């Protein structure tokens, strides 16, 4: 079955950097786009970024554009999120999620989600 | 970036029918599929409805989705205590070139 396991979360100071990873298994990783979605404590879901199945197209929320970079390594079945210039408002649980559509040019929506990794930005 | 509007709360007694609305615009719901997620306390979201009205395998037929113009709705019939959760709608937004989620609705079973 589909498994998505995030790692790399932790406490970081404002202005710092962090790299999240998501190890995928149970499906053909190289055939599906992938999303990062975050949820601040006690708040709703906020989409962060999407990467096409082959890595050729990437999309970002305005709130993270220019600071975060989504990438993937299809040979390692792993998704990444490089987060730079972190702010207090980036504090959230970050979820990695598989897109519904196979070999799609753009995102549809997540179907399977990981359990999330907590990122806390605080001095 | 919540551009889809949902009521903050909804409630019902066991066995009742509850409906949750999701209001968007021509660039998201009006031109793309709508998805619904259920998030139980302390857990990751789970896909409940995809492509407006389709249920993934394992989702009870008590859950149903519909879409009309720039709005969508999720109906839960035969409400059960285990349905107490947060529910979110979502759609791709062509203007933003990104996914947008609804503001979320907390369902309480009285």
Image: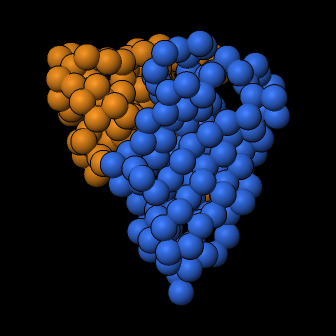
Chain colours: A blue, B orange
In the image as oriented, which residue stretches furthest toward the bottom?
A123
The residue closer to the viewer here, A35 or B24, is A35
- Position of B24 compared to A63: left or right? left
Q: From where the camera sits, is residue A42 visible?
A: yes
Name which quarter of the figure residue B71 lies in: top left
- The x, y position of residue A43, in whole percent, is 41, 60
- The x, y position of residue B59, in whole percent, is 58, 23
Q: From where the camera sits, is residue B78 visible?
A: no
- The x, y position of residue A60, in whole percent, is 42, 42
Residue that appears at 44% across and 35% down: A59
Residue that appears at 44% across and 71% down: A87
Q: Is residue B62 above or below residue B41?
A: above
- Position of A75 compared to B23: left or right? right
Residue that appears at 42% across and 15% down: B51
- Position of B54 compared to A111: left or right? left
Quadrant where the image shows the N terminus of chain A: top right
Q: Is residue A84 above or below residue A60?
A: below
Question: How many numbered tags mark residues here?
Answer: 0
- The x, y position of residue B14, in whole percent, is 45, 39
The residue closer to the viewer here, B52 or B77, is B52
Residue that appears at 59% across and 32% down: A34
């Amino acid at each position: 079955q589909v498994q998505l396991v995030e790692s790399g979360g932790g406490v970081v100071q404002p202005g710092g950097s962090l790299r999240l990873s998501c190890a995928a298994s149970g499906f053909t990783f190289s055939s599906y786009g992938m999303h990062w979605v975050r949820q601040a404590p006690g708040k709703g879901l906020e989409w962060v970024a999407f990467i096409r199945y082959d890595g050729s197209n990437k999309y970002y929320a305005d709130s993270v554009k220019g600071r975060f970079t989504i990438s993937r390594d299809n040979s390692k079945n792993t998704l990444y999120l490089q987060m730079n210039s972190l702010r207090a408002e980036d504090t959230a649980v970050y979820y990695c999620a598989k897109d519904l559509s196979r070999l799609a040019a753009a995102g549809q929506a997540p179907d399977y989600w990981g359990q999330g990794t907590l990122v806390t930005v605080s001095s | 970036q919540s551009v889809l509007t949902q009521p903050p709360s909804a409630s019902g007694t066991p066995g009742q029918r509850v409906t949750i609305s999701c209001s968007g615009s021509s660039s998201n719901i009006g031109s793309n599929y709508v998805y619904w997620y259920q998030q139980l306390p302390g857990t990751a979201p789970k896909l409940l409805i995809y492509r407006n009205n389709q249920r993934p395998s394992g989702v009870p037929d008590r859950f149903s989705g519909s879409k009309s113009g720039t709005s969508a709705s999720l109906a839960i019939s035969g409400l059960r205590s285990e349905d107490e959760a947060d529910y979110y709608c979502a759609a791709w937004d062509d203007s933003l070139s990104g996914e947008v989620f609804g503001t979320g609705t907390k369902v309480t079973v009285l």
